[in-house]
């Protein structure tokens, strides 16, 4: 989940590396560092804390060079300290390495190195990489890298510089993402194309088990045996506009961008490609983690209600540990904002190897998931900087609902008139999200009531339960309040024992057929002394009295999670702000989970 960047070219490397790290800080912000070749030696500066700490340190010393690597860290091995920050340098400063991923066999490698007199100074798995490359160096950097790769196990992307080859950087990939970019007589590598997009107009995603050598004179690609491999740069596609509001937190700005994202997503829905993926599917499996998994749960409910089809949704990490029930008639829909989520990628790859067709729902065109998939649906949200998914989650739900409707149509599960009716309702959702956003001041008032809760329980039935799960996740992610989600019918089976003063129940209630049951849930919470918040369709609110009642525009119940999600994102945002939390970079979390 760390971010790495490298640069070689005709300009000062430090500003380029820092700009790349700013773009990558969403991937981790426990520490950061750079290593720059100054023409004679490797100059390394690294600091624990946010990127600003590194910037302050660099301002105090002169670091110059046209070649370097940088890193921003999300800690997996070793706490966030200066000594555990990247880059790591081998003995006598011959090699410097930045690493994204995990070295699973670092303990035996560390023991091997210590037996040969190497002193390890950090608590990380990453440090052994630099020393191992140095140990195998006998006059050729590429050969040393290849020998090291034959020993290392795990998943990793590396950036490597050496005193032996001035103005050269190496990039290495094994299961962790790495993009190679080309500009005007300059080259770069980065975990995410956004980190180098300002000056690289061509790129190629590094494939697994590949090493790239970048120098001012050009690029060369090798496999892990050192054999030359063919490659070609491709022109970078134009990204969606980034409408970040000046002075606003990224999370708030991205919530407000939801209507525009949905308008674009609806207009650009690739119906022909999606129909190709759906053709012949008799079994459906949705894979995702976190918010992406919750989007899959909404899809499951929509497929039951609209198409009369049972769909499985599984957390990708759990799917990897279970016996696979996949056939050639299975369509696997893998959902990921970044397309680099490690568990989702591994699960999708396993499903595809088992014979399934793979459809990706992803926000990044040049991602590992879209390259793996048979068909990809890009959600067209534009870049999402805040760690907590907001516009990307709503766009995933919206895209999955369109997939559901497309399947129901081409498989004749609904009539033509029904299809037109559902399409009309889907087309109205972007406009209805604008209505929700106009209620922002009132949602802030409700959130301020939640901020001092001892616990918050999100409750719902059917699709509203899927929405409740996402609401609970958002609140705990950014405000650190204790929160859980339950089906409303399970309230009496244990959870009711926790209802008391200081506890809040947030009831999502958008289905008219469940009005009486939802009203009973509210009553059960209130009469035990807990406080209640209802998020309900506008036509139902008068029959659901609660301490706070939030009305959302009427729509079909299966479509309502698009609207209720925004309400709960606002709850999380404003509660977190009131509690003094960093809403864009919540503690212990990172945006792109590229390790298992």
Image (spheres, helix red, strand yellow):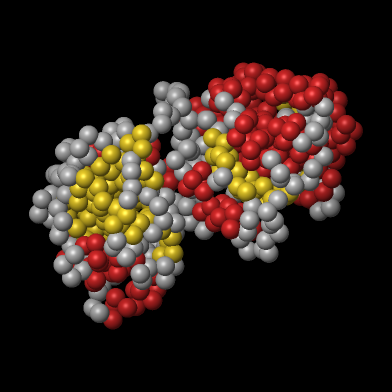
Q: Is residue 305 left or right of residue 392?
A: right
Q: Quadrant of residue 502?
A: top right
Camera-side residue of 327 and 541:
327
Q: Please name the residue shown 29% across and 57% down the image.
A: 228
Coordinates of residue 259 in the picture (x, y in percent): 58, 23
Q: Please name the residue shown 22% across and 39% down the image.
A: 186
Identify whether 276 is placed above or below 110. Answer: above
Q: Please name the residue shown 72% across and 20% down the image.
A: 424
Coordinates of residue 1 in the picture (x, y in percent): 44, 51
Identify whether 217 is placed above or below 544. Answer: below
Camera-side residue of 170 and 22:
170
Identify whether 289 is placed above or below 298. Answer: below
Coordinates of residue 425 in the picture (x, y in percent): 73, 22
Instruction: Inspect this view and state whether residue 536 appears.
Output: yes
Q: Is residue 402 left or right of residue 229?
A: right
Residue sitting farthest toward the right: 516
Label count reads 0
């Amino acid at each position: 989940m760390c971010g790495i960047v490298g640069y070689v070219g005709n300009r000062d490397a430090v500003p380029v590396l820092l700009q790349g790290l700013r773009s990558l800080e969403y991937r981790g912000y426990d520490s950061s560092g750079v290593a720059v070749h100054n023409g004679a030696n490797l100059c390394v500066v690294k600091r624990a804390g946010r990127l600003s700490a590194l910037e302050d340190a660099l301002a105090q010393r002169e670091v110059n060079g046209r070649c370097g690597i940088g890193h921003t860290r999300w800690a997996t091995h070793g706490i966030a300290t200066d000594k555990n920050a990247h880059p790591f340098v081998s003995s006598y400063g011959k090699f410097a390495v930045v690493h994204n991923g995990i070295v699973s066999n670092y303990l035996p490698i560390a023991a091997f190195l210590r037996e040969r007199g190497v002193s390890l100074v950090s608590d990380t798995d990453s440090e052994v990489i630099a020393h191992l490359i140095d140990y195998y160096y006998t006059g050729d950097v590429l050969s040393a890298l290849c020998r090291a790769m034959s020993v290392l196990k795990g998943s990793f992307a590396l950036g490597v510089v050496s005193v032996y080859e001035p103005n050269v950087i190496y990039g290495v990939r094994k299961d962790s993402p790495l993009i190679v970019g080309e500009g005007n007589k300059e080259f770069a590598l980065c975990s995410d194309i956004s980190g180098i997009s300002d000056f690289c107009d061509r790129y190629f995603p590094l494939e697994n088990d590949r090493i790239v050598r970048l120098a001012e004179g050009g690029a060369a690609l090798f496999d892990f045996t050192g054999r030359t491999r063919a490659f070609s740069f491709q022109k970078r596609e134009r990204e969606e506009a980034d409408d970040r509001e000046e002075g606003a937190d990224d999370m708030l700005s991205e919530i407000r961008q939801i209507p525009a994202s949905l308008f674009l997503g609806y207009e650009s829905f690739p119906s022909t490609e999606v129909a190709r993926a759906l053709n012949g599917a008799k079994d459906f499996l949705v894979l995702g983690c976190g918010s992406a998994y919750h989007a899959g749960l909404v899809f499951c409910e929509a497929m039951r209600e609209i198409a009369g089809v049972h769909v499985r949704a599984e957390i990708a990490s759990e799917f990897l540990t279970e016996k696979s029930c996949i056939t050639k008639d299975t369509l696997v829909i893998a959902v990921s904002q970044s397309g680099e989520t490690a568990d989702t990628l591994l699960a999708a790859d396993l499903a595809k190897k088992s014979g399934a067709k793979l459809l990706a729902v992803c926000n990044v065109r040049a991602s590992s998931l879209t390259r793996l998939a048979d068909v990809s649906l890009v959600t067209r949200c534009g870049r999402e900087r805040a760690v907590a998914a907001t516009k990307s989650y709503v766009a995933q739900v919206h895209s999955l609902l369109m997939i559901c409707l497309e399947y129901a149509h081409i498989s004749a599960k609904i009539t033509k008139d029904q299809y037109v009716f559902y399409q009309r309702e889907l087309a109205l959702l972007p406009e209805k999200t604008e209505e929700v956003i106009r209620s922002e001041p009132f949602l802030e008032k409700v959130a301020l009531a939640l901020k001092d809760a001892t616990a918050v329980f999100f409750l719902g039935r059917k699709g509203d339960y899927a929405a409740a799960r996402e609401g609970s996740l958002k609140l705990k992610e950014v405000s650190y309040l204790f929160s859980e989600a339950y089906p409303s019918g399970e309230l009496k089976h244990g959870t009711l024992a926790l209802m008391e003063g200081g506890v809040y129940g947030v009831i999502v209630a958008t289905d008219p057929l469940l009005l009486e049951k939802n009203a009973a849930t509210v009553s059960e919470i209130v009469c035990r002394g807990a406080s209640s918040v209802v998020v309900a369709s506008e036509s139902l609110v008068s029959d659901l009295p609660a301490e706070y009642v939030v009305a959302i525009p009427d729509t079909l119940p299966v479509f309502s999670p698009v609207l209720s999600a925004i309400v709960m994102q606002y709850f999380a945002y404003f509660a977190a702000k009131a509690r003094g939390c960093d809403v864009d970079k919540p503690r212990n979390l990172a945006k792109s989970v590229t390790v298992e």
